[in-house]
Amino acid sequence: MKIPAIGVIAIVGLVLWLVGKDKFKIRLGAQGKLHSLVVDGAGMGEHQVVKAPGAAGTITVVFSGATRDFQGVGITWSYRVRLVVQHSVGGTFSWEPLSGDIFSVGFLEASSPTYSYTVPDVAPAGLYSVTAFLQAQESDTIGNPTGVFTDIPGVSMTHPNAINVVTTPAPPPSGPVTPEGGIGTVDVAQAILRQMQS
């Protein structure tokens, strides 16, 4: 006995519904928004926080989630922030502070993680800009997270000239000794002089 095509479609639809329709939601791509980037308490309009090589500081990033499922319904998703601190002149020197913490953020929910950074000992003097990139976990074809985080295209924010690295010449580690001293006056007692004359 042949099952008509309409019957096959109905059976497949029933199976999908019984297994659970949530498992078959395909997310069209994670979205989010960066709101602010504060370096050592200085907002976007304040710049050039003075730091020496080896000095520590903090970076606070405020972001919100905006990921929807395939039906356009807002959902909770996993995000993290990638930070890059780059020399403002030519970008010849840069470093990435550790910023791998993962945050589960709901639709239009805000998060404001703070990260620590340390200016590398080899950082040359000058102004440095801080850029934050919002990353989200990728989705497979049926809406499950893959565990792989990538930058959300176009979702980044730069705090220009946020850090001013100032270096001072270090004293030499070793060198010759320069002996120095002085003589004030030489006094000879009168009694000793008389004894020497007799």
Image: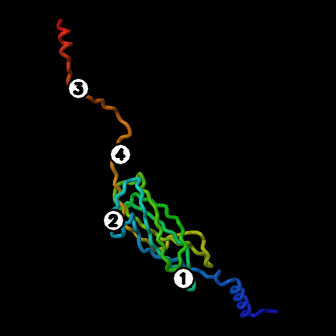
- Do we see residue 61 in this rendering? yes
**Disc 3 residue type?**
Ile
| Amino acid marked by disc 4 | Ala
- Who comes first in sequence, dot 2 or dot 3? 2
Residue under circle 2?
47
Q: Quadrant of residue 49?
A: bottom left
Query: Where in the figure is residue 97, as x and y percent of width and height?
Result: 46, 61
Alpha-carbon span between mark 1 and mark 3: 88 Å
Mark linked to residue 170: 4
**Residue 15 relative to residue 73: left or right:** right
The CA distance from mark 2 to mark 3 is 56 Å
Q: What residue is at 70 percent from the left and 83 percent from the top?
A: 19
Q: Where is residue 170 in the image (x, y as percent from the top left)?
A: 35, 45
As measured in the structure, the alpha-carbon distance from the residue carrying label 4 to the one carrying label 1 is: 56 Å
CA separation, marks 4 and 3?
A: 34 Å
Residue with the mark numbered 3: 183
In terms of image quadrants, where is residue 174?
top left
**Foreground: 142 or 45?**
45
Front: mark 1 or 3: 3
Q: Is residue 77 left or right of residue 178?
A: right
In the foreground, 38 or 161: 38
Q: Which numbered disc flags the more N-terminal residue, 4 or 1? A: 1
Task: Sort mark 1 into few (<14), some (14-19) or many (20+) by Cα contacts within 10 Å.
Answer: some
Residue kind at label 1, given as amino acid type: Gly
